[in-house]
Structure formats: structure tokens, C-alpha cells
Amino acid sequence: MDNHFDVVIIGGGASGLMCALTAGRRGRRVLIVDRSPRVGSKILMSGGGRCNFTNRFIGPDRYVSANPHFCISALNRYTQHDFIAMVEKHGIPFHERDHGRLFCDRSAKDVLDMLLTECAQAKVRIQARCGITAVEAVQAPNSGPDRFKLTTDQGGFSATSLVVATGGLSIPGIGASGFGYDIARQFGMHVLPTRPGLVPFTFTGVLKAVSERLSGISLEVALSCAGRTFRENALFTHRGLSGPAALQLSNYWRTGECVEMNVLPGIDAAQWLASQKRDHPRSLLRNLLAQCLPKRLVLELQAIFWQPWANQPIGGLPDAVLHQVSEGLSRWRLKPSGTEGYRTAEVTLGGVDTGELSSRTMESRTRPGLYFIGEVVDVAGHLGGFNLQWAWSSGAAAGQFV
């Protein structure tokens, strides 16, 4: 059959392209099918168009999964250093930002062009604008291994190995869907409940009004919930709270929980207040705080924590009031009403149960020849290049065995 391949990969994103070029280098005849007009759309969006393609500090503790050990094998066998070496081989200039995040100097297009070049060299065929209407397993002639047959609006294709690299539900505006989960369920595999990750929080009521008044303010905070703390910038928006600290924490937050914000991270608020009372007894607390916090934020904190004493010099504030202020500065409790959802989420939490897959090959334990890689699997990384590294690592893992 002219349309029979060794490997068909559904999805031309980061993991699909990496799997394709890895398998193609081994001499496998590979086809990528993708319903989008062009492959790699999410790569182009990454890092604000500069592609945060990996991180210096990759480790399993930077990933969220029902099985936190599952990602170790793939991450160890195709590391951030391996991907950096490919970037350097192609002469792509890049730089490092805070927390080990690596970005292209010019454009994310450099990384996508690199992957497409590698695929072309490996003779990978890419079929874009290709909508799939059916996926089935068919018995091969002569009692060989089962084949997978795809029915599409561009004809039928078959392969000995089928790789599902369809991504998750995040950013439906660029074509995200639950198709990969449907394929897993079709073949009897368990799919864990999904929810948006790396996504801004939303507020309602009084907190929404506060966030609207503070909209546009960004500052370094320590944001905590569920035993996790992230010390990075937070950004107040018209809807709630965004910025790296909020996005990171959203991977661990559950509906109904409060988050705590320390607006003076690295400073003992109680000691600082005591020293200010001793050294500047005639000053107003809001004026002292305005030296280290945005004035609009100070006024909101004042309204919440010491409004009755707003015009009293700090030297006249009772210790009980200063204690209340200290608690407010260190553990300002905010209760999100929810998140902005998949519309703006950078990743999908949950997905194909890792217990269904080999951590070494990404192959289904019950359906030989069927593989799942990237975001469709229940592995989600922190902000900062971790999710793209999982795409590279899981794609390479499968590509070595398909």
C-alpha cells in the first residue's frame, strides 16, 4: 500500500516533530498528520514568541503527575543538554534568563525551522490540513503485527506504529482538542481527569474590585498553597492574579482553596515593623511601606489591615495592630473563584494515565505499537521550558522504539 508507513504520528507539535525526526534518523518511514494549516503553532507562541525551549535545571521535581517517577527515564535519556546541542549545531543564538530559562535571541521560528529541517533530512512526510475521521486497529496479513489504519479527509493511511502527540486542551484557539484522550479510551486505556495548568487566577466580589484597582501592578512575592511556595513576580489583572508566581501555583491549587501572598519575601515583616516603629516613630506606616511597595498596593493593604489607624504615626500603633499588619504583609489570604481556564492555560494537567505506558518507550502496555507522548500524557511541567523539554524527551523516547 502506497500509504503504508512504519510510523504515523498524529500531531505536529513539539513532541510529534521530535519523535518523527528521531524515528526518521533510524531509517523509519514516518508520516505526521495534523489538522492545522501548519505544524508547530504552539512552539511559535512559546516564550512570548522567543521560545523558552528548555531549562538548565530540569528534574522530576519540576513536574506534576499522579506518578512523579514516570518522567525520570525519558528526561534522563534525552536531556536539556542534548537539545541545547541541537540548537547550537544549527547556529541558533540564545540566552539565559532568570531561573535557568533558555530563550531564542531572535524568534521561536528558529526552533521550528530547525525541527522541520531535521525532519526533512530524515525524509519525514508532513500532511497538514488533514482531518482524521477514524482510527482503528486492523489485523495484518500473514499473522504479522496489527496495523493501525487512519481514515482522513485526505485519504487512508496505515502504519505498524501509531504515535499520539495531539497535546491537551490548553489554548483551544490554536486547535487544541481532546482527540488524543478519545483515542486512548477507544483502545481501553484509562485517562485521568484533566484541568488547566499554568493559568491565571480569577476573583469575584470584593477581591475582584481590589484586583481591578491594582491592575497592571507587578511585584516579586512569595505565593503559597498546598504546601508549595513560589517566589517570583505576580501581576494583578482586571480579572485576578497572573504572572509567573500565580501560573506556577495554579498547577497545585484546587477549587475552594485559599492562596497566601507574602508581599515582602525575604523580609521578616514583624521585625521590620518593629524597627520602623523604633527608628521612625512619627512616620505614617503607609509612607514607610511605599518605599518598598507600589503605593496603590499599600493603600489597598491599609484599607484591609489598618484603616482605623491609617493617620496615626507608627509610634502610636499598638503592638496588636502591628501584629495584624505583619500577618497581612506575610500571609495575605486570597481566595480565587477559579482560573481563566483552558483559554489561556499553558498546559493541561491530567491525561493518559502513565500506568498504561512504558516509561522507557512511551508504548501502551496493552496495545503494542500504540504510543502516547507530550502533553496528552499525565505529565505537566512548571513554567520555564519544562513542558517543552518533556515534549523533546518523551518524543525522543518513543522515536527510538517505534
Image: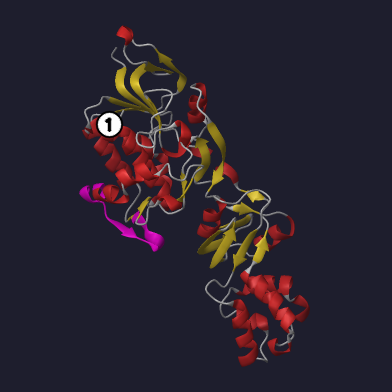
Q: Is residue 253 in the magenta section?
A: no
The residue located at (42%, 41%) in the rendering is 70
Res 223 → quadrant: bottom right
**Dividing the image into 4 quarters, which one contains the N terminus?**
top left
**Residue drawn at x 33%, y 16% as measured from the top left:** 145
Left/right of residue 260 with respect to residue 20 in the rendered view: right
Q: Is residue 247 above or below residue 310?
A: above
Residue depicted at x 74% and y 86%: 312
Residue segment shown in magenta: 86-103
* Residue 293, placed above or below residue 164: below
Decide if residue 357 is on the left or right side of residue 225: left
Percent x, y for residue 183? 48, 25
Q: Residue at 42% of width from left, 38% of height from top? A: 374
Q: Amino acid at mark 1?
A: Ala
Q: Nearer the viewer, residue 218 or 324?
A: 324
Judge by depth and name the residue closer to the eye, 380 or 119: 380
From the top left corner, tell me how far across and down residue 134 is, in percent.
Answer: 47, 18
Question: Residue 72: where, in percent of width, then height?
Answer: 38, 45
Q: Nearer the viewer, residue 318 or 49?
A: 318
Colouring: secondary structure
Q: Secondary structure at mark 1?
A: helix
**Residue that mark 1 sits on:** 23
Q: Residues within 10 Å of mark 1 (few under 14, many from 20)?
A: many
Residue 191 drawn at (x, y percent): 53, 32
